[in-house]
Amino acid sequence: MCSIIGYIGNRDVAQILLDGLSRLEYRGYDSAGIAGIQCEEISVVKRLGRVKNLSDAIDESVKFDGIGIGHTRWATHGSVSLENAHPHLSFHGIFSLVHNGVIENYESIKHFLVEKGYEFYSETDTEVLVNLIEYHFKKETSLENKFLVSVQKALLHVRGTYGIAVLCKHSPGEMVVARKSSPLLIGIGDNEMFIASDACAIVAHTHNVVYLNDGELASITQSDFSVVTMKNEKIDAVKCELDWRIEDVSRGEHEHFMLKEICEQPVALQNAMRGRFSDDLSTAKFGGLRLSPRELRQVDRILFCACGTAWHACLIAEYLIEKYARIPVEVAYSSEFRYSNAPLEKNTLVFVISQSGETLDSFAALQEAKRKGYRTLAITNVVGSTIARESEGGIYQHSGPEIGVASTKAFTAQVCVAAMLALLLGRLRDMSFDDGVAFVQALLQLPEKVSKILEKKDEIRLIAEKYAHHEDMLFLGRQSMFPVALEGALKLKEISYIHAEGYPAAEIKHGPIALISGKCPCFFLATQRNTLQKTLSNILEVKARNAMVIAVVAEGSKIPPGCTDDLIVVPETHDALEPILATIPLQLFAYYIAKARGCDIDKPRNLAKSVTVE
């Protein structure tokens, strides 16, 4: 979840690194630092807190000689302290290293190095790795490519995950990078090279990138690079072109990335659907699945794996696919599936959903499913990401970069893709042509209906401000609205730090009703006509216990006077798409509550955007 940036070229190295780190700060903001070659030595500057603190500490005396690396930290090994901040120097000052990941066997390596006379100044596993590289470098005296080989030899002893960038003062024009289960890419410029853990850090400078695969290392100079395996086998790198623009990773006129991304949802939904309907507009099509209609018809069961917000999208996918395609669906936390030994039927299709395509637990779940011989597909937002490359096929969301830590447009795009997948599978089985056409028409109208909800931002802001002082809240819904309730509670927890829980509405009588009082408002998702009366009964139950009630309902719903304290009306739509429309008010509600409470919305405490460590 930490972030890495590196640069080799003729421009102001420190400024390039700082600009990149500021774009990567959503991946970690406990500390930040940069290192570079200066006057034939490695110079390091690092500060606690945000990148701005680091920027303020850098003056004209910091003039790197054309090469440098940078890092923002999300603390894993060791507390938040200056000693634990990256970059780390080796004991004799020969190497500096930045690292994203966890070295699991660092204690035994540290013990070995202490016996060899090495001293340590931090609590981190990263300092152990940089000293191990130095140990091999000093041990070998006559090797060609001594820098690269020393990194290779050190990594052969490492158990765990890493994305690293390394500088060596004895090779001042070269940088060595490597990855295992942690994202890293090389950006190719005009007589300059970049490395980053996320493309958004370098999109202002180049659109030509190479994504490193697991077990690959690269030696990079200003004008060239070479990629090899851990066994020193040369790799023909595949170059890709980024389709992002610098505007995509800027806030523009919005105060926060989260609000910008909430407002981008009509376009994100259009992009998720573009070119993915049949000519007769009766079904969806996904060329990236790489499965024929016959193969899809042979699927007996579907397993979805994901984490966090993407897991909620999977729960909605379960409701939709079982309802419209009549295929049994299971949903597993990726972190649980990778260690379980759950029995799966022979014709099970495994989907992994991850916005970044780099979520470590989801990648591990994908690998486990492949190891057991199941067909694996991915739904992800980042072209060239690890999960996208390692799956056998999949669906890109095309949502554009999502910078806000709390996922918004990526979630609704995932649900949109899930609805289209339910349509495709349903039409391959027993969904009629007319029902398919009605489904497609509802999907095509979806962006406009989301826009109508966004026009109510001020109305929702006033409601949110009314409840901003509360410290507990329940979110309740039935059927596919239950995952939406979970997502609404998660959004509120993530950015406002209010304790919130999501439940099926009927389950409140089985325990949670004990929490309900005038101090615990309840947010009901009541857009479904077929369960509206039952949900109204649940609302009356909590009203009888003095709870304040906010409800989201569809246009035309008959809500008795006094049943709710605040009402948010959304457009009526197809049953399958109700979760998307109901989600928009929840996102805005959480955003405006967090703003009223003075929270750091885009950088909530203890959280980072992409979880790339276990």
Image (spheres, helix red, strand yellow):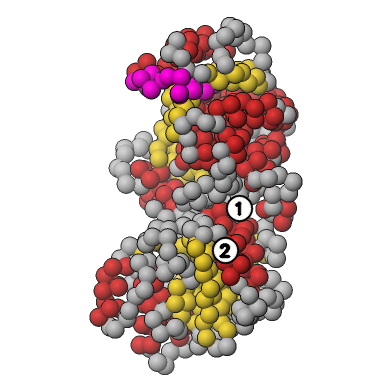
Q: Please identify the quarter of the rendering in which residue 259 is found.
A: top right
Along the line of sight, the residue nearer the viewer: 283 or 406: 406
Which numbered dot is residue 109?
A: none
The residue to which callout 2 is attached is 53
Name the spot of residue 157 as percent of width and height, x first: 33, 72
Q: Residues within 10 Å of mark 1 (few under 14, many from 20)?
A: some
The residue under the point 53% across, 41% down is: 495
| Residue contact between numbered discs 1 and 2, judged by CB atoms under 8 Å | no
Residue 317 in sight here: no
Looking at the rendered structure, the kind of residue marked 1 is Val
The residue under the point 62% across, 63% down is: 20
Looking at the rendered structure, the kind of residue marked 2 is Asn
Region rendered in magenta: 511-525
| 116 on left or right of 491 | left
SS assignment at label 1: loop
Query: Earlier along the polypeptide chain: callout 1 or callout 2?
Result: 2
As for residue 522 lying within the magenta part, the answer is yes
| 512 on left or right of 256 | left
The residue under the point 41% across, 75% down is: 130
Q: Is residue 309 above or below residue 572?
A: below
The residue under the point 46% across, 49% down is: 606
Along the line of sight, the residue nearer the viewer: 492 or 581: 492
Q: Is residue 314 above or below residue 144?
A: above
Name the spot of residue 468 as percent of width and height, x first: 55, 31
| 375 on left or right of 199 | left
The residue to which callout 1 is attached is 383
> What's the CA distance linking mark 1 and mark 2?
33 Å
